[in-house]
Image (spheres, rainbow, N blue to C red):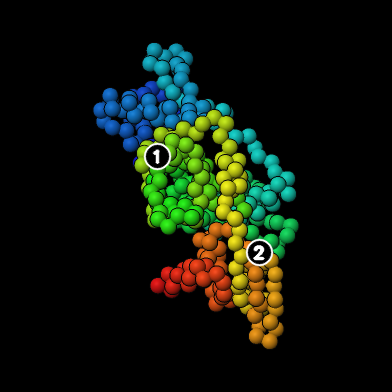
Amino acid sequence: MSRRKTERLLSLVVCLLSARRYLTAAQIRDAVPGYPESFDAFKRMFERDKDELRELGIPLETGMNPGSDEEPGYRISRQAYELPEIRLEPDEAAVLGLAARVWRRAELAGAAEGALLKLRAAGIEAEDISQPGIEPRLQTGGAAFGPLWEAVRDRRPVTFVHLAAGRSTPQRRRLEPWGVVNRRGHWYVVGLDRDRGEQRVFRLSRISGPVSFTGPAGSVTVPPGTDVRAAVRTWGAGSPPPRTCILRIRAGAGHGLRRHALSIRPDPERGWDQVEASYSDAGWWSEHIASFGADVVVLEPTDLRDAVIGRLKGALA
């Protein structure tokens, strides 16, 4: 949704909420900025705006003012629009605060902070948690997450370049996205692949380059009964078999890698541990290893070692 349209709809809602009587279309055109001068053009735009407000769940009413011979008008009942007072128990507020902290350094940080501000405005303190040692973080799958999340929210088709597992050449995909899902630390987008005419799942870490919108908002329809989480679980069942690698990890470091260890052989004299670990996705695994910098060295296999070196050189450049 464009900024101009957002501002017009917001002004329309404020106008109709503030009015104590039904406002005619002509009165609305005069009071709300952003509508065209031509009455015919205004009527067409106003009809679209009314439909949009109702789709958003805003109770737009049509009626006549008592004792008036004017044409039917419009208003938004404040009683029907406003939410009742929200009462949260301390533990419920703590859970909401913890959820907001998960997103604090991720793509939805702005929305999370806005939610906390609303709770504080209502007199609810949502920052206090019973275990201050817990500091959760949720990463959002790189640059692809933001536009794909917007596309799902606004129901817009997209196109992007994707490198499928086992392929050496990336392909451009045209997708009607239905949902973005996190499973076992990885992000996926589920939707209708327009070129293949069927449901497909794409891993966000395999998307390179920008994600582009290819249609207007509202042009994607999610089939009734769609379960995007089940689609990702089913798709994951067909993942490539796990592989093993040999890593040299500095003592006291690389705890995120050690969780995948099949065996660990300490070498106290040199201050390093030799770790045999299991992985499935070489792309994500090489990026994960590279994030530990000089604390981890890949000994085997050579293709994984080369992938990590390539990522480190890219970061240095």
Q: Is residue 141 left or right of residue 120?
A: left
Q: Amino acid at mark 1?
A: Asp
Q: Residue at x 34, y 29 (%)?
A: 45
Question: Tag on residue 260?
Answer: 2
Q: Is residue 44 above or below residue 284?
A: above
Q: Residue at x 70, y 78 (%)?
A: 266
Give the spatial CA distance, label 1 vs label 2. Answer: 37 Å
Q: Quadrant of residue 139?
A: bottom right
Q: Nearer the viewer, residue 239 or 135?
A: 239
Q: Are marks 1 and 2 in contact (CB under 8 Å)?
A: no
Q: Amino acid at mark 2?
A: His
- Where in the figure is residue 255, as x and y percent of width and height? 65, 69
- Where in the figure is residue 164, as x and y percent of width and height? 47, 52
Question: Tag on residue 195?
Answer: 1
Q: Is residue 71 above or below residue 33?
A: above
Q: Secondary structure beneath disc 1?
A: loop
